[in-house]
Image: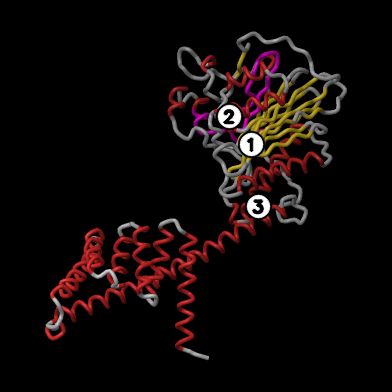
Amino acid sequence: MTTPAPSTASYSLRYACVCDRGLRRSGNQDRAWADLDHRVFAVCDGVGGSQGGEIASQTAIETLQDAFYTPDNNPPLVRLQRAVHYANRDIYEMALRDVHLTGMATTIVALYLEGMTAYVGHAGDSRLYRFFKGALQQETQDHTDTQDAVRRGDLSIEEARQMGKKNVINRALGINPDVELETQSFPFEIGTRFLLCSDGITRHVPNTELADLMARHSDPQVLCEMLHERCYMRGAEDNLTALVVCVDGPDGPVETTNPPPEVQKVGIHGRFEIAETLDPNSGRLPQMNTSGEFRKSREQSIPPKSFPPERTNSKIHPLQEYLAKHRAATQRRIFIGSCIGMVLLGVAFWAGIQYEAAVKSLAEQSTSAVGTTSATQGQPQSSKNNLALAEEGRRDFEARNYKSASEKFLKLVDREPTRAEYRFWLGRSLLADRQSKDAVTQFEMTLTLDPNSHEAYVYLATARRLAGDAAGAEGTLKRYQEVLAKDAAAVNPR
């Protein structure tokens, strides 16, 4: 939605914004803020696991609001610098006090308009563009190792393109107690349009295409919708935010002549998408133009000597309720994960005990069957063969030759289909051979033949879970609990 501002003595402002999580992210860690009355605009792109990036970017916006809503007689650039440094301090202190937020940070690009001068502060790879009379100027330089190397001349454009992790930033709010904020100021005129955006926009829409879109679409809402559409058409791999600010005359939008088919000029500072700006001899970026209309006073700001009282521990912190919900959700996840882990450990421990008991039982039966003459003289030859085959299958299982063990126990099941012991071992062999669904069938038959086979319940639950039947596994464990309760009642009758 396009929002107009009340007109001032010399100009009025309009803006439109799109802030979207994209197609591949589960949440949106981008934040944008526009205050037409105070003429302050900002875009933040949070980074950090879980909700850390979301909290970092939201904290930056909240702190900027506090700073600009509080009366301040400092010069505009100092006021902007102090606001960003307060935000950095709050994010850093918050991460120190909450282990779940460790490592959270956020980029920022902030624009403050005072009179006919624009004041800009940024850290990271969120950008500010200025479009005026058909010319697009990138006013900020990305703070990444790759871009720094290109600007120094250590890398050519082609070398930079071949490098991985081009978007790894080396400056952001919240990483260190102090942030190296880059600030600048420059004059602007009525008819200027500003674009503040996160890298979710610029990774899909290069500067040449941005210039073309801004030349063709003077309505900020339409421009935001076009950027949104282009990013989605190209995968929308990241959160994306675009905030377009239009400087109109006191009576509304200024009519401008249509630009020629090709945009007049694209200025670039620290990006390697615009081949037209390369030095034809060296293939490297030219030195930054600091003359004429786009003259800037650029400096690396330093933090103020004194900060107002810390807000990160106070009851008035704007994110206290948000943080409380985040911590509660994190604690619930840890508790549930711990419970699941304990249950799985218990099942594994019980399964190990039952496995050892079953192996011992089968070994004793086999030994007594083949080693004691008096016990085998009256048995038919087929029974002797079955016991011998069962012993071979057990040895194969212990040697982790699960396929061979499965084949032997399958023969035994064919010969004696009502013997629960053979079906149980066939199920164990199939489960170890990662044939979970077939193992489920054999463990079910085992329990049909011998409902008191405790170990069969444990392995059946395990096989069902591995086969993707979580509900069936839970049902089996409940049945097992009922069997245990029955056994306990039989041993200790009231």
Left or right relative to 158: residue 135: right
Count residues near mark 2 (Cα–Cα under 10 Å), then give few for <14, some for 14-19, many for 20+: many
Nearer to the camera, 348 or 143: 348
Coordinates of residue 350 in the picture (x, y in percent): 40, 73
What residue is at 69 percent from the left and 24 percent from the top? 222
When asked about the image quadrant of residue 208, the answer is top right
Nearer to the camera, 66 or 451: 451
Q: Are marks 1 and 2 in contact (CB under 8 Å)?
A: yes
Count residues near mark 3 (Cα–Cα under 10 Å), then give few for <14, some for 14-19, many for 20+: many
Name the residue that disc number 3 marks: 94
Residue range (magenta): 121-149
Name the residue that disc number 1 marks: 20
Left or right relative to 157: residue 224: right
Nearer to the camera, 442 or 241: 442
What amino acid type is highlighted by mark number 1? Asp
Question: Element under label 1?
Answer: strand
Name the residue that disc number 2 marks: 231
Nearer to the camera, 207 or 70: 207
